[in-house]
């Protein structure tokens, strides 16, 4: 495993192009585009103010930079560096900006969610969609890019509108049976739209493309309900994470639960493996420490090393008691992710912040628990194989696969010799699965995985 040199970035604005060839990073008001393989700078663009959002078009030919505080969107072209586009929403303001699937239209949501403006880069035409709902996930496109679902709020009721993306014509418009819609998401095959209600009411609705209600699911009432929803890549399963610390799996045939995964404080199942991270601090003599103190504070010699140990069952999982008097209590399943082959589901229960739970979907049971020293910040599956990467805000990246798990130290750079180590706060896989982007507060580097050809050699 190798690491690249370290680069600057701002607000973790770092995106790999859909074709996997380019890496875009933002440093204040500058947009830097690099070749992913060589990391050489190919283009350098200057925006009018600090960039707050960056997104590639689907064909990797254009880059969108949003400056929300000024209501501006700037678009840059890789093929024609001299060409650029500026969209000013004026007094309407701007809270969200994104590409349409064709990479030639931009959807801007104005302040107070008064409307969604669809701007065409080809014809310079403008279309308006009224009454978008202010919710966590109110717009979603099908994977093939043909249809867009939009959550709307009018006359104190929730509605769903389905648009054809080729000409932005309204295909279906229907009322949603929700009290206060919280989010919508298409299944990966684009056949079913999942709609879920506010956390105050446990309700998931499943609609067909033509607006028919296929099923309604509610696990319980009179308590905090849904916290996260995710489809499996195969579209066969819908996982629902709840405030009651359970994940319920619905099947795509009857839309009934096939199982629910609990997150117990004590793990006693003989079929589960618990990996616990164990830290080991290097022992250095007083004379060596005083002699090298000023020169090697950032070097790997003095860093805490860690490894995984398999625990003897039963195992007690560290639990943090949430404060009942505060809003959005730290309890329940907030993060879930399926592996690319839909075989495994990774979950995180917020009142067990140091643990990641891995479930075997084929056998419908707990498979592995990764217990970290520090709270888990982020985890993500390799897009090509069942391999999970996670970080906890220290100078290490952790990898799990069915073969086992490993803790990898991110090497220090000369620039960090006196300012501390590289603290990994977020990570993102390259589409090939051969490299991993690691991000600290103001720096990033690439971690290159050993490929099968290299391991055989």
Image (cartoon, rainbow, N blue to C red):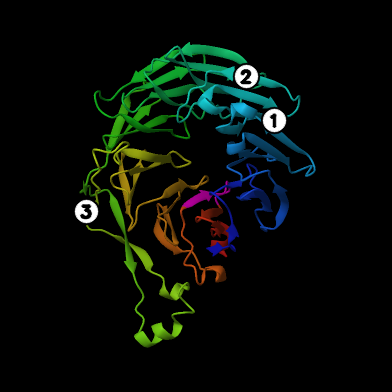
Q: Residue at x 33, y 66 (%)?
A: 279
Name the disc covering residue 194, or none: none
Asked if residue 294 lies left or right of residue 456, the reply is left
Q: Position of residue 144 (x, y in %)?
A: 59, 28
Mark 2: secondary structure = strand
Crowding near the residue tagged with mark 2, few <14, some 14–19, many ≥20 C-alpha atoms within 10 Å: some
- Mark 1 vs mark 2: in front: 2
Query: In front here: 262 or 173?
Result: 173
Give the farthest residue toward the bottom: 287
**Disc 3 + disc 2, Cβ < 8 Å:** no
Callout 1: SS: loop
Q: Position of residue 270 (x, y in %)?
A: 23, 49
Query: Residue 91 at x, y = what percent?
Result: 62, 27
Q: Can you say which quadrant of the picture contains the C terminus?
A: bottom right
Residue for badge 3? 315
Residue at point 56%, 32% (across, down): 96
Q: Residues within 10 Å of mark 1 (few under 14, many from 20)?
A: some
Is residue 59 located in the magenta-colored stretch of the structure? no
Secondary element under disc 3, as helix, strand or loop, is: strand
Of residue 229 and residue 89, the one placed in the foreground of this image is 89
First in sequence, mark 3 or 2: give its number.
2
Which residue is at the far front?
A: 91
Q: Disc 1 designates what residue?
A: 104
First to last magenta residue range: 426-433
Of mark 1 and mark 3, the one earlier in the sequence is 1
Q: Earlier in the sequence, mark 1 or mark 2?
A: 1
Residue 58 visible somewhere in the drawing? no
Disc marking residue 128? 2
Quarter of the view holding residue 290: bottom left
Picture coordinates of residue 247, whole percent (x, y): 32, 35
Please report the residue visible at 46 percent of the width from the left and 29 percent of the height from the top: 235
């Amino acid at each position: 495993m190798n690491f690249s040199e370290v680069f600057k970035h701002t607000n973790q604005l770092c995106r790999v192009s859909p074709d996997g060839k380019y890496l875009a990073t933002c440093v204040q008001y500058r947009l830097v585009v690099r070749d992913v393989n060589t990391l050489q700078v190919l283009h350098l663009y200057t925006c009018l103010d600090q960039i707050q959002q960056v997104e590639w078009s689907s064909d990797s030919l254009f880059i969108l930079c949003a400056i929300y505080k000024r209501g501006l969107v700037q678009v840059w072209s890789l093929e024609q560096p001299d060409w650029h586009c500026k969209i000013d929403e004026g007094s309407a303001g701007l809270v969200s900006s994104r590409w349409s699937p064709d990479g030639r239209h931009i959807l801007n949501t104005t302040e107070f969610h008064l409307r969604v403006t669809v701007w065409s880069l080809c014809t310079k035409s403008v279309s308006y969609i009224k009454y978008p709902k202010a919710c966590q996930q109110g717009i979603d496109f099908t994977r093939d890019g043909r249809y867009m679902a939009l959550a709307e709020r009018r006359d104190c009721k929730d509605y769903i509108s389905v648009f054809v993306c080729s000409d932005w014509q309204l295909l279906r418009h229907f009322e949603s049976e929700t009290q206060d819609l919280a989010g919508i998401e298409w299944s990966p095959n684009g056949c079913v739209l999942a709609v879920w209600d506010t956390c105050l009411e446990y309700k998931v609705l499943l609609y067909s493309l033509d607006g028919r209600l296929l099923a309604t699911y509610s696990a319980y009432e009179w308590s905090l309900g849904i916290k996260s929803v995710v489809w499996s890549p195969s579209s066969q399963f819908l996982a629902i994470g709840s405030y009651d610390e359970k994940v319920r799996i619905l099947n795509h045939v009857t839309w009934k639960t096939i199982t629910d995964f609990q997150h117990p404080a004590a793990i006693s199942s003989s079929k589960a493996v618990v990996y616990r991270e164990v830290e080991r601090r290097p022992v250095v003599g007083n004379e060596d420490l005083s002699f090298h103190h000023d020169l090697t504070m950032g070097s790997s010699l003095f860093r805490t090393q860690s490894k995984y140990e398999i625990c003897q069952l039963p195992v007690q999982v560290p639990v943090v008691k949430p404060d009942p008097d505060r809003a959005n209590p730290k309890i329940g399943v907030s993060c879930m992710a399926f592996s690319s082959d839909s075989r495994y589901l990774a979950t995180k229960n917020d009142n067990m912040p140091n643990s990641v739970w891995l479930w075997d979907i084929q056998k419908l049971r707990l498979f592995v628990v990764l217990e970290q020293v520090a709270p888990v910040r982020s985890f993500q599956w390799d897009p090509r194989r069942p391999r999970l990467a996670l970080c906890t805000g220290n100078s290490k990246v952790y990898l799990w696969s069915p073969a086992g798990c490993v803790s990898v130290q991110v090497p220090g750079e000369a620039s960090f010799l006196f300012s501390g180590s590289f603290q990994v706060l977020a990570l993102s896989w390259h589409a090939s699965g051969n490299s991993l982007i690691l991000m600290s507060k103001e720096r990033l580097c690439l971690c290159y995985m050993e490929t099968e050809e290299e391991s055989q050699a």
